[in-house]
Image (cartoon, rainbow, N blue to C red):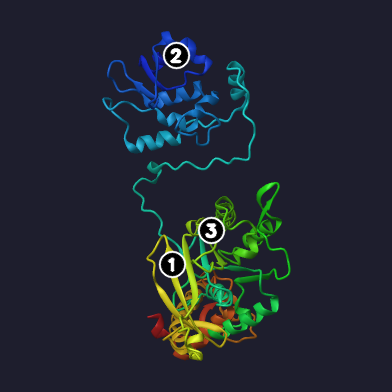
Amino acid sequence: MLGFNKILADLGTDTILLADLGLHPLWEDLEDERIETSSGCLSVLHRSGRHCDTSRALEIISQEFAGFPNLFDLSCPPMDCPVFGEFAFMLIAPSSLQRESKQELAKSRSALPKSKDPVVTEQFMQESKLEPQKESDFVAPAVIDPLAWGDVEPPARRWVVEGWIPSGHVTGLYGPPGNGKSLLAQTLLTACAVGRPWLGMNTTPMKVFGLFCEDETEELWRRQWSINKHYDCTNYDLENMLLTSLHGLPSMLMDFGENGLDGTDLYSWLLSQVRQFGAQLVVVDTAAATFGGDENNRAQVTKYLNEILAHLATEIDGAVVLCAHPSKSSAYSGSTAWDASFRSRLNLSRYPIDDDDEQPDLELTSLRILEKQKANYSGIGDRLVLEWNDGCFRVQGQSEDTVDRIGRQARHRQVDQVFLTALDSLIAQNRNVSHAPHAANYAPKAMRRHSAAKGVSKAELTAAMERLLEQGTILANQTVGRRPNRTPLHGLARSQDEAK
């Protein structure tokens, strides 16, 4: 091991202030080396006032003391290094010296040695007569260095439903039994799967997965049939959605047994399914069926929401919606950890009816109120009055025709543009497509494999083709290219007016 005099000579300095490591046996013989201890950060002071080579100091100090486990006792934890790591970042020149620019400091941080050489570590363990640290399941979190962000603007926040359901987090959907939470959640899954609005609000098209614990398969089927009629789609359009029913089956996602708190085999299965499918929205219905712990135990609730559901949201780079029942006296049941862990919490309740009214208006009994009661990333207090009709919810005051017309027209314009983009691309490749359903090069079928048509069903492309033909935007049997023998290729193409 190098003596401190040599280190000081290499650094061009004669004084080093260290965080208090006086309990370590190797520090005892350093008093005559002009080593001082203090409770402050590790600093390098330059003897003659010249600028100290900080990067060289980092290199020497980190190499020299990379084997001392006591360095873990410092207030600044290590990042990726087994022992030293982030401690080297504590080298700070005093204010009287010229500091490196922020850009140079960020570069020097990223270039720090991060060796995990077991031979070096074991050597220092033996020299210092310290016991090796025992292995543990602890996974050190990443340390965020704001300098690495520089002047780059952060990415925009992503939403499943803007202002209501953020991506990357867990949203709670609360409501008393029988109010329609499961129906509302399955409607949300369908809206995202087919790229349609949910309760009049735009959604982000994505693959979705629904875990339903209280409804049997036939009930999910019946409910989906009504939702499909609302969105004017069929089950063949639901290629981006998967559902599962755990009715009558074990449904716990976390084990609260004698071995501690761990994800169950069901959770491992769920994680595998959504990863394989590529789902970015998962609905878990309900908390009561999947939690299984003590709802008043803050530690258990926090672990379930953070290490199971929030972990699931992180793994799929998407969102999780958890359906839950409130208590009789508050908006949620159990520990306040439930509310604290949600980034967004929605509540579905029945429309208030006068208790003295023995025969309330039947129209009022079909109304629900969806309220945004918590939102970390948007305003709260937004309310929607929903009307149950023909097996589905819609916003009151917007008739089915109005909601469908607005959503359908926006979707039609989007799919029409996808069709035209794919058509232009195919023609540029000298590939012709036909409007004839039984042709081998039937346009909707050929376009399904095009990157521009991701998330668009064959039925939607077929409808777009018919609309564009009817409008005269595209024409059939046009010359779109030539074969190698110079004979013409015929197929769909933009009209001359549209091409201009």
Could you say whether the residue bearing mark 3 is in a helix, strand or loop? loop
**Observer-nearest residue: 445 or 495?**
445
* Mark 1 vs 2, N-terminal side: 2
Could you say whether the residue bearing mark 2 is in a helix, strand or loop? helix
CA gap, disc 1 to disc 3? 24 Å
Quarter where residue 324 is shown: bottom right
Mark 1–mark 2 CB contact (< 8 Å): no
| Image coords of residue 88 (percent x, y) | 44, 29
Image position of 210 with respect to 264: above or below: below
Total numbered badges shown on the rendered structure:
3
Disc sitting over residue 317 in the figure: 3
User: 10 Å neighbourhood of mark 2: few (<14), some, or many (≥20)?
Assistant: some
Mark 2–mark 3 CB contact (< 8 Å): no
Question: Label 1, on which residue?
Answer: 373
Q: Residue at x 59, y 16 (%)?
A: 127
| Image coords of residue 312 (percent x, y) | 58, 57
Q: Amino acid at mark 3?
A: Asp
